[in-house]
C-alpha cells in the first residue's frame, strides 16, 4: 500500500532543487515553485494532485510534454555540424516535482527493505566514492 505523500516530503523535495536551472516547458522555474509553497493552501493542492496521480494510476499528458531547445556551443567558426550544438530538453516542472517525490520514496522503500544488493553504490543517496573504495578494499582483502 502506498502511503499518501506528506507536506514534509513535498517541501524537502522542492528545497533540494536548484533555482538557477532553466525554466521548464511550462515557463516555471524552481524559484517560482519555492515561492508558491510559502502558501499552505498551495502546498495542500500540490500534495492532493500528487496523491491523486498515484491513487488513480494516471499520469496527466501535460506532465509528459517536453520542449527541446537547441543551443549553439560557443567559440565555433561555423555551425555546420550537429556536434556544434547542445540540445536541452525542458520538461513540465510539476511532472518533474512529482517524479522526484516518487523516486525518493521508491529509493527509501527499496533500501529499507533490503531489495538492493549491498555493494550497489551508484545512483543511491548516502553512497559515496569513499563507500566504493571501502567496499573494494574489503573485497580485495577477503579474497
Image: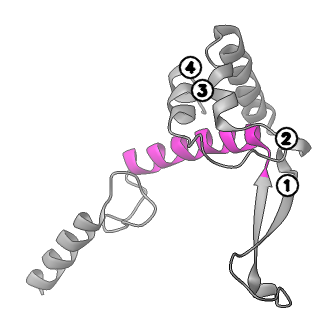
Q: Whole-Å distance between the Cαs marked 4 and 1? A: 27 Å
Q: Earlier in the sequence, mark 2 or mark 1?
A: 2
For mark 4, give the secondary structure: helix
Q: Earlier in the sequence, mark 3 or mark 2?
A: 3
| Residue for badge 1 | 66
Which image quadrant for residue 97? Answer: top right
| Residue for badge 4 | 7
For mark 1, give the secondary structure: strand
* Discs 2, 1 touching: Cβ within 8 Å: no
Disc 4 crowd, CA 10 A, few/some/many (<14, 14-19, 20+)? few
Which image quadrant for residue 98? Answer: top right
For mark 3, give the secondary structure: loop
**The N terminus lies in quadrant:** top right
Q: Earlier in the sequence, mark 4 or mark 1?
A: 4
| Residue for badge 3 | 5
* Discs 4, 3 touching: Cβ within 8 Å: no
Amino acid at each position: 500500500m502506498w502511503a499518501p505523500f506528506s507536506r514534509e516530503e513535498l517541501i524537502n523535495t522542492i528545497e533540494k532543487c536548484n533555482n538557477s536551472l532553466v525554466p521548464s516547458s511550462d515557463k516555471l522555474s524552481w524559484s517560482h515553485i519555492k515561492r508558491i509553497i510559502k502558501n499552505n493552501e498551495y502546498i495542500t493542492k500540490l500534495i492532493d494532485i500528487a496523491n491523486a496521480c498515484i491513487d488513480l494510476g494516471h499520469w496527466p499528458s501535460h506532465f509528459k510534454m517536453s520542449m527541446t531547445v537547441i543551443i549553439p556551443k560557443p567559440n565555433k567558426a561555423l555551425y555546420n555540424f550537429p556536434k556544434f550544438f547542445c540540445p536541452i530538453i525542458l520538461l513540465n516542472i510539476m511532472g518533474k516535482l512529482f517524479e522526484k517525490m516518487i523516486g525518493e520514496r521508491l529509493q527509501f522503500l527499496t533500501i529499507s527493505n533490503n531489495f538492493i544488493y549491498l555493494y550497489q553504490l551508484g545512483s543511491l543517496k548516502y553512497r559515496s566514492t569513499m563507500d566504493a573504495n571501502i567496499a573494494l578494499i574489503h573485497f580485495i582483502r577477503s579474497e
